[in-house]
Every structure is written in structure tokens, then in C-alpha cells.
Amino acid sequence: MDKSGIIKPVLDASYPMISHGKGIYLYDTDGKRYIDGSSGAITANIGHGVEEIADAMEKQAKQIAFVYRSHFTSAPAERLANKLASLAPGNLNWTFFVNSGSEATETALKVAIQYFQEQGIRTKTKIISRWTSYHGITLGALSMSGHALRRERFSALLEDFPAVAAPYCYHCPLKKTYPGCGLACGNDLERAIQEIGAENIAAFIFEPIVGAAGGAVTPPPGYYEKIKEICDRHNILTIADEVMTGMGRTGKMFAVEHWGIEPDIMTLGKGMSAGYTPMAATMVSDRIINVIRKGSKIVMSGHTFSANPLSAAVCGEVIDYMEKHELVRNAEEQGKKLMASLQDLQKKYPIIGEVRGKGLLCGLELVSDLPTRVPFSATHRVGETLISLCFKNGLVIYPAFGGVTGFEGDSVLISPPLTITSFQIYEMLRILEESMEELMNGLVSAGIL
Ligand code: PMP
């Protein structure tokens, strides 16, 4: 055993050593090629090894890499903030830069509470979230996340924030069926507000499409319109967590555009830098900034590396690259093809219970019994096995299980870079199919199926 080293996700497990990447492909030091079918953690949106980004990085690093945000502003950070404001829906015109999605969630929480405090409303301090959600790993963000597995060890330290039913029709937590349910999951928010008191609630946070906790769980029509109406009526802010869904991933620049809703706060991460640098953001509407401007004038948050010019230049270049290559449109078009191919695969393999998502954020949920939607027992590790088989066969996909409370589940995310071509989708599907075949054979010979 080594006497020192990096703490790996699973201690003492062996991980291949990466050599380099180009486009959707990754190569390890043994020369094995992988298709990055999940863009890492749904991050490498423009693909790997893009020269323009490396050039922008070099240029900025030579000019000025770091200044502290209380001392100087910089052209790359100003330009990026203005660009994001021009792209974002509604009046989300103000950006607070941070370094990770978790920090973006923490900042959203603080800004929401501050908005009410500046107006002398000191009781509005709770944030409602949904069961089956993930907003980050830090304690504030975990308090707002309905991710059972990631909360488990730290439950004693987490804030007692309320959570409501997720719009998860395939396994409705309220045991109802759409549309006869009358959007009961939306009504569950109203119930929680009545129970806790609107005077105690600052905001409601949601991932427009649930990613890591559920595998591209997509709400039914009408859900977000209902949520927005309820929140507005009770003077509760809406926080859209677009860390995973934002920056073109779902075939629109931001996933909220699918429902035409305008949140008060929006968080970004992952695809914003496409993995070329750690950077994330919390975008805030005019309404909130105007209140803070009239009050203390200070958003009480910040990190050493916030808004550093190097990362800002990289993110600016990522957006330019996306626009130049029309990657949002490509995500929409190729997403339709990927979804259709996954639906074909579903017809062949009865353990694929549901194929869901939008654009290039696609989820597969595996079940042991198709008619009853009963999941596999967690002890059988079916989702993990599929992921390992794909990896062995040269395809990286992403786990999205452990988030659901009340039952075990095996969902995976298939979310390749937004640059993917039709041929590459075909290549990816061949490996997925080969891996599904091996999985089925293994389940049958183990007597699980
Ligand atoms: N929000 C969402 C929706 C996410 O998917 C993630 C990361 N999976 C986060 C927040 C946290 O981001 P980070 O890992 O960069 O802290």
C-alpha cells in the first residue's frame, strides 16, 4: 500500500491514469480509448482538448491571472457577467462568481435570506427543496438537497429545511398518476408552506431537471407554472439550480426556458467553464439587487478565487466557442437522436424502465420488473455494474442513484459533450448495447432475472 497520495473516491481502488482527451474521446496512459458519454460529471460540454481555450488561458495567464475582487475588477470578469446577463432569462442581470456549484448554492441561500433581512423581514430563513434533488456537498447545500446517500452521515449537522414531493412521475412519491393527479406534487409545496408559514420561508430551490439524484427526472407539463404561481403568491423567491442543466445541456441555453419561467436566482457551474477551470456563478435578479443596493450594499459572501481573471477569460471563451459552433442547437438536435436510440434500446431490454430527459441530458432507469416498476435490490448493484461494464468497454456514463428516498433505484445519466455527431452517438450506443447484453447475461446467470 502507498504511504502517501491522493484520497481517491474509493480508497485503494485503482483508476486508470488519464493521458489526454480530444473532442468526446479520452485516452489513458495504456492507450485505451473511452467515449466520454457523461462529459465527466456533465461538465465537459465543449469536449476535450479545445485549442482556442488553451490559447485564451495562456494569453490571460501571461497578462494577469489573479487579483482579489475587493481590490480590482477585470475586463474578462466584467465581460463574462454582461454576457451571462444577456443570455439569462428575465431580469437575472447580476452575477456573483464562485468556484463550484456547491458554493453557488450556498451563495443563493445567503442572497435569498439577505433580500428579506434588508427589508427588515428577519423570519424568512428557511429554504424549501424537494426530495430527490442534489444542490451540492457543503453543509448548507446538503441541507437543501434531498439526496439520501449524501446526507446520511451528516444529518446531525444539517439545517432542518423542509422538503416536498418531487415531480417524479415514474415513481410518484404521492402514488398518483399524471394528469389525474392534478399536479399533486405542486400542491405539496402549498401544503408545506401552510405548515411552516410563508413568513418563515425565503426561497424554494429546484433543479429544472433532476440530475445526480434521480437521472434526468423531468417534471410533467404545468408543474413549474404552478410552482412559480405558488411562490409568487407567498412572497417566496425561486432559485433555479442550473448547475447541471444550464449552458445548453438540455437543448436550450437554460432549462427553465422549456417552461418559460423566470427564477429570481439562478445558479450555474459545470458547463459554464466546460471543465477547463473551476468556476461557477450565482445570478441574481434586478429586484433583489435593488433591495441590497438600497440597504447594506454588500452581498455577504465571497471566496479568495471569486471572479479571478484567468477563470473568467476561460469561461468567456467557452461561451464564444459554443456560439461559434452552435452547440445549443446541436444539443437539441443530437439529443432527439440520442433519445430515439435509447428508446430503441429500451424495446430490446425490458430492464430499462424509463428513458427520460431533454437535449443531451438523458437518463435511463433500470427496474427488475417492467409492469410494476419495481427496482432492483440495492445489494445487487445493478446500476454500478452497468457503469463498470460500460467503462470496461470504453464508455463513461454517470451514476444517478442514492438520491431517492423511499426506494432503491438504479438510474444512470448519458450526457456526452454538446459537440457530439450522429456517428458518435451510434458509436456510443453500440458500446452501451454491448454492455447491456453483458449485464443481462450476468443477471440471468446470477438468478436475479
Ligand atoms: N447542483 C447541481 C444540480 C449539481 O448537479 C451539482 C454537482 N453534481 C452541484 C449543484 C454541486 O456542484 P459542485 O460539485 O461543483 O460543487
Image (tube, helix red, strand yellow):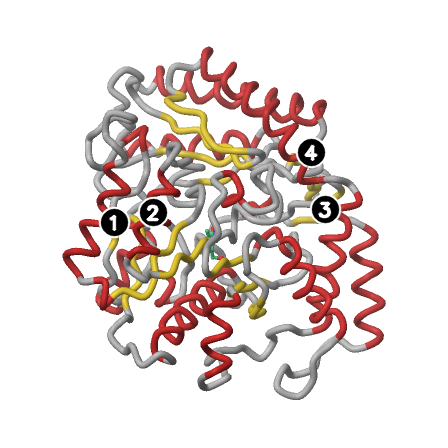
Q: What residue type is labelled 2?
A: Ile
Q: In this view, does 428 lie above or below 78?
A: above
Judging from the image, what secondary structure is the residue with disc 3 in?
Answer: loop
Residue type pointed to by label 1: Leu
Distance (Cα) linking label 1 and label 2: 7 Å
Residue in the foreground of this view, choosing between 337 and 347: 337
Mark 1 secondary-structure assignment: helix
From what the image shows, is residue 104 above or below residue 376? below
Would residue 213 be found to the left or right of residue 361 on screen? Answer: left
**Which residue carries the number 4 mark?**
330
Q: Which sits earlier in the primary sequence, circle 1 or circle 2?
A: 1
Q: Which of marks 4 and 1 is in front?
A: 1
Who comes first in sequence, dot 4 or dot 1?
Answer: 1
What amino acid is at disc 3? His
Residue 291 on image: x %, y %: 45, 76
Q: Quadrant of residue 376?
A: top left
> Is 372 drawn above or below residue 203 in the view shown?
above
Secondary element at image label 2: helix
Residue furthest top as drawn: 348
Residue at the image position 61 percent from the left and 37 percent from the top: 416
Whether residue 1 is visible, yes or no, is no
Q: Name the residue under label 3.
A: 48
| Residue carrying label 1 | 189
Q: Which of 429 and 417 is in front in this view?
A: 417
The alpha-carbon separation of the residues under discs 3 and 4 comes to 17 Å
Report x, y in % for residue 398.
50, 40
Residue at x-position 63% and y-position 55%: 272
Asked if the residues shown at circle 1 and circle 2 are in contact, with their CB atoms under 8 angstroms apart, the answer is yes
The residue under label 2 is 227
User: What is the tally of numbered marks visible in this picture?
Assistant: 4
Q: Which of marks 2 and 3 is in front?
A: 2
